[in-house]
Amino acid sequence: MNSLTKDAQKAAERVGLLSDKIVINGGKPLKGRVDVRGAKNLATKAMVAALLADSPSHLLDVPDISDVGVVTGMLGAYGVSVTKVGEGELLLDPTNVLKAQFHEIDALAGSSRIPILFCGPLLHRLGEALIPDLGGCRIGDRPIDFHMDALRAFGAIVDKSYEGIRLTAPNGLKGANIELPYPSVGATEQVLLTAVLAEGVTELKNAAIEPEIMDLIAILQKMGAIINVEPNRVIFIEGVEKLEGYTHRALFDRNEAASWASAALATKGDIFVAGAKQQELMTFLNIYRKVGGKFDIHEDGIRFYHPGTPLKPVVVETDVHPGFMTDWQQPLIVALTQAEGRSVVHETVYENRFGFTDALIEMGADIVVHKDGLESVTRRVPRRPLEQAAVIVGPTPLHGADVEIPDLRGGFSHLIAALTADGTSTVSNIGLISRGYEHFIDKLADLGADFSFED
Ligand code: EPU
């Protein structure tokens, strides 16, 4: 069994998914309603923030996904009790924080990238932190240099050992002036979670300003933090002495919402995504409209549907917020295989995020990946050396194939491709999808997908 399959099986077990292989009879439009709850990329960080408080926190709309299970395990290893007190409701009690045992941390190695965010809170609470080797999707090198440089600027000492990363702060953590080389989401969160209890003021330049980060800042403010978000990606954090627990409803998962929207377009379907909101999806909605996709915005969600006429090609560049998210391109590319003409997707955030297109090509798509990138007339940001581009020429009918899911978002696009394709497909490693898509099997059934499981 290869390590990817092992990751997929571990993730599947965490959410009680019984089989890691699904057989799909495609060619039928997905129609109906799906409910989207809290964002993976906020809920997991909000759980880490609970560790900073002296009293329990109450998080609402927590999705039932395997990454939440990993963070629950990590918090448990450090003595934070995480109790499910209702549907999607967690009570996180950090009053008995203690040093973790190596074997408990080691059991979580390779499962997610969230544990890196425990560094600052653990240094504040315990004076030291042990972080396992990280996991997450294999979409590039995914270094942690920005994180470690920021922690050192606060006064942390970082040692790498066979156990993972060990950090200490013999002289405590002090506010710092930090400029990120790139507006990294994780490094911005690292700085926020460390600066709120550090002594003095922290100035963070070139910060990421994704909606999930703004929601994390809202949580930290509820806890007693003082954080000012200034123009031009500058954030000031005034350290405080103590923080209290929060009560917060997690921001909806805009990546999941965009994924179902693209599924509606690719399969000629019609999906009402309950819980989706316009504000956080504006950039996505603009591209959706350019491709020809229709949407109606309601109080309680957004209806996404195929126009009934041919789709149009588009040029898209992924970017940090407020640009087009890198997590939106994979499902959209499936829809673009059905558009009339030549689309180009420039990936500027990760250096290896088109691996999933191999399976689409096997299913009949006409996609060429340019590993060194292509020039674009619509460029919003200076070129990064790691850029890649995919050229998609459509429309191409897709046919069933046996495909193996490589990562979370690429994996969801394989599901959509199999649902769009004529004939039968076998999709394996679906456990990886449960890292970020809550109850996706039930949702597919509700949308009328024709599938069964294979052992
Ligand atoms: N980077 C560095 N050094 C660092 C940190 C980042 O070079 O120390 C580079 C990365 O290699 C990448 C770029 O900076 O090329 C952006 O990475 P970022 O730190 O912003 O990403 P992340 O925090 O690791 C989060 C999401 C990703 C999402 C990105 C971009 C979580 C748990 N993950 O990752 O989500 O794609 O931001 O928005 O929040 C997903 O949900 O499937 C997923 C991969």
Image (spheres, rainbow, N blue to C red):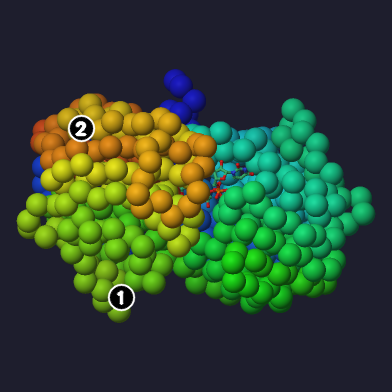
Residue labelled with disc 1: 300
Q: Tell me the SS state at disc 1.
A: loop
Q: Residues within 10 Å of mark 2 (few under 14, many from 20)?
A: some
List x then y, in percent, for residue 328: 36, 51
- Name the image quarter holding the C terminus: top left
List x then y, in percent, for residue 141: 56, 33
| Direction from residue 158 to residue 378 in the image, left or right | left
- Residue farthest along the bottom direction in this orientation: 299
Question: In the rendered structure, which amino acid carries the disc numbered 1?
Answer: Asp
| Direction from residue 10 to residue 301 in the image, left or right | left
Q: Residue at x 66, y 52 (%)?
A: 180
**Rendered position, 248 above or below 442:** below
Badge 2 or badge 1: first in the primary sequence: 1
Residue labelled with disc 2: 366
Q: Can residue 96 be seen in this view?
A: no
Q: Is residue 347 visible?
A: yes
Question: Which mark lies nearer to you, 2 or 1?
Answer: 2
- Name the image quarter holding the N terminus: top left
Q: Which residue is drawn at 62% across and 38% down?
A: 143
Q: Residue at x 50, y 36 (%)?
A: 386
- For the residue pair 383 and 56, the one nearer the viewer reads as 383
Q: Tell me the SS state at disc 2.
A: strand
